[in-house]
Image: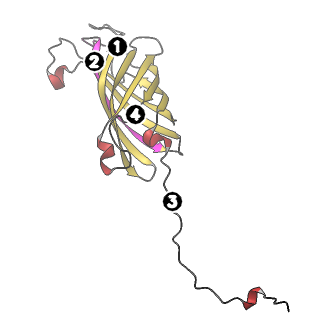
Amino acid sequence: MQIVAFAADLAPSTPVYSPPPAVVPVAAAWQNGFELRVGGFAHAIGSAEKNTGDVSVGLVLPSLFADQQSWWAMLVPRPYVGAMINIPHRSDSFRGGALWRFPIWGAWFAEGFFGGAYDDGSINGDARHNALGSHVLFNAGGSLGYHIDQHWSILATFDHLSNGKIAFGTGFSRNVGLNDWGLQVSYAF
């Protein structure tokens, strides 16, 4: 005698709940990778070197100390290095320092940066050159940015170079400084 069983003959089993697999968020490249930035700036607005332009190139490195998933990661700076090349070469600069990024809302963010720079411009100035007072300068500024996707961002940036005479009392006789405004595009690796 042969016994034949069909699927309908099997007793129903009690469903066992199993939670869905945990989804581990993938960090966007700009959160913990290198960023290459290029941009164009209006150079030295309101000074002797006005009406010229700069081309900028920079590299933002990953944070050296913070776990990028912690709430306090935005307080730990990221190192940056870069150059601002003036098209008629009145004042070119090479710079580096620390950069902080703060989320605002959605894909919008703000940045602040502070560091040092070497500028090949004029120390005493003339009709076509700002009186920088020193070739070694402070570099400070900020950006308002938007993350287009995981890799690309665009930033509106204010960049200031100065020898710090007014803010830090460095004692230089001249301190016209340079104020640049521009747009940058960033690609995060």
Q: Earlier in the sequence, mark 2 or mark 1?
A: 1
Q: State the residue position of label 3.
A: 23
Instruction: Tell me how far mark 4 sits from mark 3, CA to CA.
Output: 36 Å
Q: Which callout, 3 or 1, points at the residue further toward the start of the chain?
A: 3
The residue beneath circle 1 is 119
Q: Is residue 132 magenta?
A: yes
Q: Residue 137 bears which disc, if any?
A: 2
Q: Which quadrant of the figure has residue 112?
A: top left
* 41 and 99: which is toward the camera: 99
- Secondary structure of the magenta portion, mostly? strand
Question: What segment carries the magenta color?
Answer: 130-146
Q: Nearer the viewer, mark 4 or mark 3?
A: 3
Q: Which residue is mark 4?
A: 157
Q: Nearer the viewer, residue 95 or 76?
A: 76
Q: Residue at x 50, y 62 (%)?
A: 22
Mark 2 or 3: the one toward you: 3
Residue at the image point whose x is 29% and y is 11% from the top = 135
Decide: marks 2, 1 in contact (CB < 8 A)? Answer: yes
What whole-number distance in Å separates the C-alpha atoms at marks 2 and 3? 47 Å
The reply, left or right, for residue 50 in relation to residue 169 is: right
Element marked by disc 3:
loop
Q: CA distance from mark 1 to mark 4?
A: 19 Å
Whole-angstrom CA distance, mark 4 to mark 2, is: 19 Å
Return the residue found at the far right. Answer: 1
Name the amino acid type tagged 1: Asp
Q: Nearer the viewer, residue 12 or 53?
A: 12
